[in-house]
Image (cartoon, helix red, strand yellow):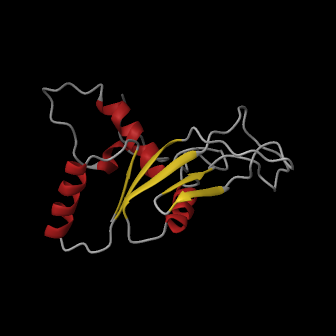
């Protein structure tokens, strides 16, 4: 089980995650915080560090460029200087480098977008968009619990707000 968050985890949250996963006999777990980093990398060779550049700060923290110079285009396709993401592990079965590779891959999974990559992994990007929809739902109503209800379909809209 991998849990991605856009905020630091509190000890009580980790304890709650562990209790819930123990009840379901989940053995492998990675709790990952992904936030914008204030650490920047610079390159003398290209305009910005290549997409996928990763700097391990220690065994639980690293900096990952999910946007940056793309060799195929021979340039950085973005409009602004890319800001890397800071990855922090709270509990992990896999190494920081393996988690960073997974996060990088998940930035390419937004099929509702024509970009080569996104800044955020799809796990966090979709959760944010569902949250944007839910803020307009009247608290008197019973919101749909199924996550799929809020996902966009190319054949028919699932939810119109």
User: In the figure, is residue 104 to the left or right of 93?
Assistant: right
Classify 120 as above or below 106.
above
Residue at (71, 32) in percent of width and height: 80
User: In the figure, is residue 1 to the left or right of 116?
Assistant: left
Classify 72 as above or below 78.
below
Total numbered circles: 0
Classify 122 as above or below 1.
above
The image shows residue 161 at horizontal and vertical percentages of 36, 28
Residue at (45, 53) in percent of width and height: 88
The image shows residue 159 at horizontal and vertical percentages of 35, 37
Say which quarter of the image contains residue 27: bottom left
Quarter in which the N terminus is drawn: bottom left
For the residue pair 36 and 106, the one nearer the viewer reads as 36
The image shows residue 131 at horizontal and vertical percentages of 34, 35
The image shows residue 47 at horizontal and vertical percentages of 82, 42
For the residue pair 146 and 10, the one nearer the viewer reads as 10
Q: Which residue, as the protein is rendered here, is positioned at the far front?
A: 58
User: In the figure, is residue 107 to the left or right of 68?
Assistant: left
User: In the figure, is residue 150 to the left or right of 139?
Assistant: right
Residue 13 visible in the displayed image? yes
For the residue pair 126 and 111, the one nearer the viewer reads as 126
Residue at (57, 37) in percent of width and height: 38
Say which quarter of the image contains residue 101: bottom right
Classify 59 as above or below 64.
below
For the residue pair 154 and 37, the one nearer the viewer reads as 37
Residue at (52, 63) in percent of width and height: 102
Residue 152 visible in the displayed image? no
């Amino acid at each position: 089980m991998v849990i991605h968050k856009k905020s630091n985890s509190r000890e009580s949250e980790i304890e709650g995650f562990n209790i819930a996963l123990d009840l379901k006999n989940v053995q492998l777990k990675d709790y990952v915080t992904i936030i914008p980093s204030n650490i920047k990398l610079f390159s003398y060779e290209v305009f910005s560090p290549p997409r996928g550049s990763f700097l391990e700060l220690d065994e639980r923290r690293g900096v990952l460029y999910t946007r940056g110079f793309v060799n195929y285009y021979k340039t950085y396709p973005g409009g602004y200087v890319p800001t890397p993401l800071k990855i922090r592990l709270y509990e992990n079965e896999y190494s920081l480098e393996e988690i960073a590779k997974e996060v990088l891959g998940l930035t390419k999974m937004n099929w509702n977008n024509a970009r080569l990559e996104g800044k955020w992994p799809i796990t966090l990007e979709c959760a944010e968009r569902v949250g944007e929809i839910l803020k307009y739902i009247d608290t008197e109503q019973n919101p749909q619990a199924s996550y799929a209800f809020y996902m966009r379909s190319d054949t028919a809209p699932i939810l119109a707000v």
